[in-house]
Amino acid sequence: MQVLTELERRVGREATARAWTSEMFMQYLEQSAYEEKRPLQASVVQQYLAAGACPSISQNGASALLLMVLNPYSSYEEMVPICRMVLQKRPQVVCQRDGFKLSPLDWASDYENIAAQHNVPPNPAALLALLPAVVELAPEMADASGARCLKVSATGITGEARPETSLRFLEGDRVRCRVEAPGGTTAWEEGTIVALWYRDKCWPGSFPGAPYEIKLDIGQLVYALSDNDVMIRSEAQKAPSAGLPTKASGGRFCKRQREDGSWELLDTKSGKSRACSPPDSDE
């Protein structure tokens, strides 16, 4: 109590209350994943956020969002509103990287290994909820967060279910896809739509599937979780990075190319940006 009293004296009662709520929030997330081994509840997360908890608070290099992603027990139905609430409150948190220089999306895409560490079946809930939320609610964070099309799985299937959703592309269409590139970057690669509505066998039935499976010209098969220009666009449409990798560093600032070909420096914490020189040029 003496510590809280001193903190309140220094920063005020309101700031102290928010800090304490954030600490309790982190405790809830950590206990759920590692001690109680239980799923997160959207209603509980909402209560913490409404009380002032900060999604970007970090302990031992892990943000609150990362702890949510590392929980292999949560359902897709609960993770969808959780991810949307977090991004609406603090979208920059998707760009925060841990000590391994990995973003929450990087970890979410590795859901099989996360589940294996807990000795439970693979759970893709965090990936299926978070990546579409980033594309929809924080597209300006796509570069720094590592949002991209992902490699298809050996157990993946296509065409089993065809939701009544209008898609922009058909099988055989030529497209550009945002994909992973060496060094923790993303790049745009050309390819051809080879199938519609890809899904892996462990994906929940409530998730409609990834709209497209694409065979890249470099030979790789990937899928796009969202039918959006942030992830996939017509080959005739110019890629934002003009075919060059977009920077996705582990630091606070990263360079990215605008639609008009100029470059800007993005502050991944505030979301603000300013014009800058191209990478590898004299500042």
Image (tube, rainbow, N blue to C red):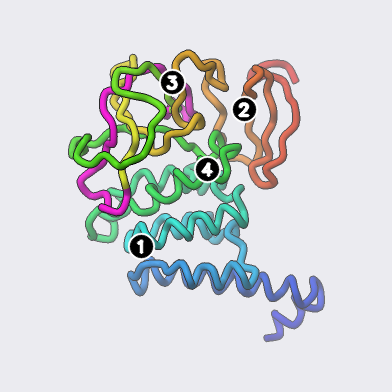
The answer to whether residue 280 is visible is yes
Viewer-closest of 177 and 187: 177
| 200 drawn magenta | yes
Q: Nearer the viewer, mark 2 or mark 4?
A: 4
Q: Which mark is residue 256?
A: 2
Q: Secondary structure at mark 1?
A: loop
Report the magenta residues as a range: 179-207
Classify residue 187 as left or right of residue 161: right
| Figure check: 23 above or below 154 | below
Q: Amino acid at mark 2?
A: Arg
Q: Are marks 2 and 3 in contact (CB under 8 Å)?
A: no
- Of label 4 and label 1, which has the lower sequence position? 1
Q: CA distance from mark 4 to mark 1?
A: 22 Å
Q: CA distance from mark 3 to mark 1?
A: 33 Å
Q: CA distance from mark 2 to mark 3?
A: 18 Å
Q: Amino acid at mark 1?
A: Ser
Pointer 2 local density, CA inside 10 Å: few below 14, some 14–19, many at least 20: many
Viewer-closest of 168 and 36: 168
| Figure check: 13 above or below 214 | below
* Residue matched to label 4: 136
Q: Quadrant of residue 71?
A: bottom left
Q: Secondary structure at mark 4?
A: helix
* Residue matched to label 3: 176
Q: Quadrant of residue 54?
A: bottom right
- Of label 2 and label 3, which has the lower sequence position? 3
| Figure check: 77 above or below 246 | below
- Of label 2 and label 4, which has the lower sequence position? 4
Q: Which mark is residue 74?
A: 1
Q: CA distance from mark 4 to mark 3?
A: 19 Å
The answer to whether residue 62 is visible is no
